[in-house]
Image: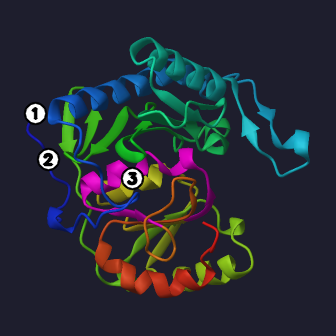
Amino acid sequence: MPDVVFSNRDLACRGAPGYGWSMTDTLDHTRLAELEDFAVSLAHSAADVILPLFRADHGLTDKGAVTGRVFDPVTEADKGAEAAIRAAIAARFPDHGVIGEEYGEDRPDAEFVWVLDPIDGTRAFISGLPLWTTLIGLRHRGVPVVGVIAQPFTGEYFVGSQHGARLLRGSERWTLRTRPCHDLSQVLAATTDPHLFAGLEQEAYRRFHAAARLVRLGADAYAYAMVAMGKLDVVVERGLKSWDVEAAVPLLAGAGGRVADWTGAPIGRNGGQMLIVGDIGLLPALTPLLGPAADPQA
């Protein structure tokens, strides 16, 4: 079917160079398309493991119980899906590295490195809510070049690169564009949980919440995809890991948005405080609210 464009954002506003802002041009179109297709196939491999366990006996355990930290759930779906993705990568690209939430690092300095979160939003998963996603990012020479955010229960596979962003659902395909929004008072935003912010970060979040039109909670990385789709404008998070953010960078860049830290600079490869914007024109209004609480170590 023909591409359906969700909003008419000017793609000239894709951002400036930097780890979190743009992508390398060293891969030719054919090679990049091959890697995009493979990334989507990895998401399908993960779905084959995850879906039979969704709203079923998923083997929940608490990683936080070992350390005495807060509840940190993991399921057999998390572990099995990452194992399946790793096996598929090893079979197709044995020289590629992998970084994953469940099984750690394998050759993280390789030319190509896959960064995986088999289930982002495990709390939603164990609650039976279809807001969890599978996150698959690919770095080439340290730069994110392909990102997939998949919600297989709804059949949605969001994929992005320097060639643009699209939503795949069955045989259908839609082009993704972020939407223009220059006025902070009109912003539709999301964060996972406001109780995750403390101290200066909590004060910064309160300023942001007071300025935005609406802030939705609990969508995890599904909210990233909604910014790419032009349904949300901003996502604010803190305390993230590389596997939480890697897939978002190419997806948002391909749709016309940006993934930054709280100062508006490119987000580092280790995660931390994250600010996703659909319209980069919002950054001058957002960074005075969040920047005073920025982590200097990020």
- Separation of marks 3 and 1 at Cα, in angstroms: 27 Å
Task: Give yes or no for contact between labels 2 and 1 (Cβ–Cβ under 8 Å).
Answer: yes
Q: Is residue 256 magenta?
A: yes
Q: Quadrant of residue 189?
A: bottom left
Q: Which residues are magenta?
A: 237-260
Q: Is residue 75 left or right of residue 83?
A: right
Colour scheme employed for the rendering of this structure: rainbow
Q: Are marks 3 and 2 in contact (CB under 8 Å)?
A: no
Q: Judge whether residue 230 is colored magenta.
A: no
Whether residue 38 sits left or right of residue 218 in the image: it is left
Left or right of residue 105: residue 10: left
Q: Which residue is mark 1?
A: 1
For badge 1, the amino acid type reads Met
Is 34 positioned to the left or the right of 46 in the image? left
- Alpha carbon distance from label 2 to label 1: 9 Å
Q: Earlier in the sequence, mark 3 or mark 2?
A: 2
Task: Say whether residue 203 is visible.
Answer: yes
Q: Position of residue 37 (x, y in %)?
A: 28, 27
Question: In what element is the residue under mark 2?
Answer: loop
- Residues under labels 3 and 2: Cα distance? 22 Å
- In this rendering, which labeled residue sits more in front, label 3 or label 1? 3
Secondary structure of residue under mark 1: loop
Q: Quadrant of the C terminus?
A: bottom right
Q: Mark 2: which amino acid?
A: Val
Q: Nearer the viewer, mark 3 or mark 2?
A: 3
Please give the name of the residue rendered at 21% of the width and 68% of the height, measured from the top-left corner.
Answer: 13
Provide the residue designation for mark 3: 249
The local secondary structure at tag 3 comes to: helix
Q: Residues within 10 Å of mark 3 (few under 14, many from 20)?
A: many
Which residue is pictured at 66% across the width and 84% down the height?
Answer: 203
What amino acid is at disc 3?
Answer: Val
Q: Where residue 46 sits: x, y (%)?
A: 50, 24
